[in-house]
Image (cartoon, rainbow, N blue to C red):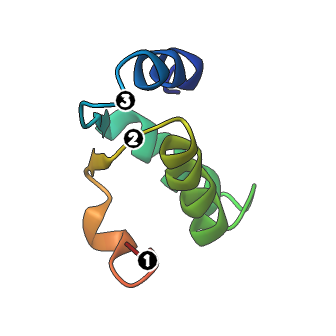
């Protein structure tokens, strides 16, 4: 998973710059498979991950799951 502590440190040090982060397809595949197998529900897991990236300082999140998340996230 993402190194959110590192993201937070960078954003704290350089708050004047927008932070773009990318969630790789392997992370999404892992999350999707876990939900398929019944380990957890997909929507709450995605919302937690996206929220965690925002809390770490991400201004923009680039991800392969964008079409899954349309309608889930407020800007």
Q: Residues within 10 Å of mark 2 (few under 14, many from 20)?
A: many
Q: Secondary structure at mark 3?
A: loop
| Residue under pointer 2 | 58
Q: Secondary structure at mark 2?
A: loop
Residue 35 spot, x, y in % from top left: 62, 60
How far is disc 1 from disc 3 in space, using C-alphas?
A: 22 Å
Q: Earlier in the sequence, mark 1 or mark 3?
A: 3
Left or right of 46, for residue 68: left
- Give above or below for 51 relative to 25: below
| Residue under pointer 1 | 74
Residue 60 spot, x, y in % from top left: 28, 48
- Give above or below for 44 relative to 26: below
Q: Earlier in the sequence, mark 3 or mark 2?
A: 3
Q: Is residue 42 visible?
A: yes
Residue 69 spot, x, y in % from top left: 38, 71
Left or right of 35, for residue 50: left
Q: Nearer the viewer, residue 30 or 37?
A: 30
How far is disc 3 from disc 2 in space, using C-alphas?
A: 11 Å
Q: Is residue 33 visible?
A: no
| Residue under pointer 3 | 15
**Residue found at x 25% / y 37%:** 18
**Residue found at x 59% / y 66%:** 42
Q: Secondary structure at mark 1?
A: loop
Q: Residues within 10 Å of mark 3 (few under 14, many from 20)?
A: few
Q: Quadrant of residue 14?
A: top left
Front position among marks 1 and 3: 3
């Amino acid at each position: 998973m993402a190194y959110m502590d590192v993201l937070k440190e960078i954003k704290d040090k350089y708050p004047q710059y927008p932070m773009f982060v990318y969630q790789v397809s392997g992370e999404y595949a892992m999350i999707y498979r876990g939900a398929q197998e019944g380990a957890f529900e997909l929507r709450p897991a995605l919302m937690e991950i996206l929220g965690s990236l925002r809390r770490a300082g991400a201004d923009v999140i680039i991800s392969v799951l964008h079409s899954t998340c349309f309608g889930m996230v407020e800007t």
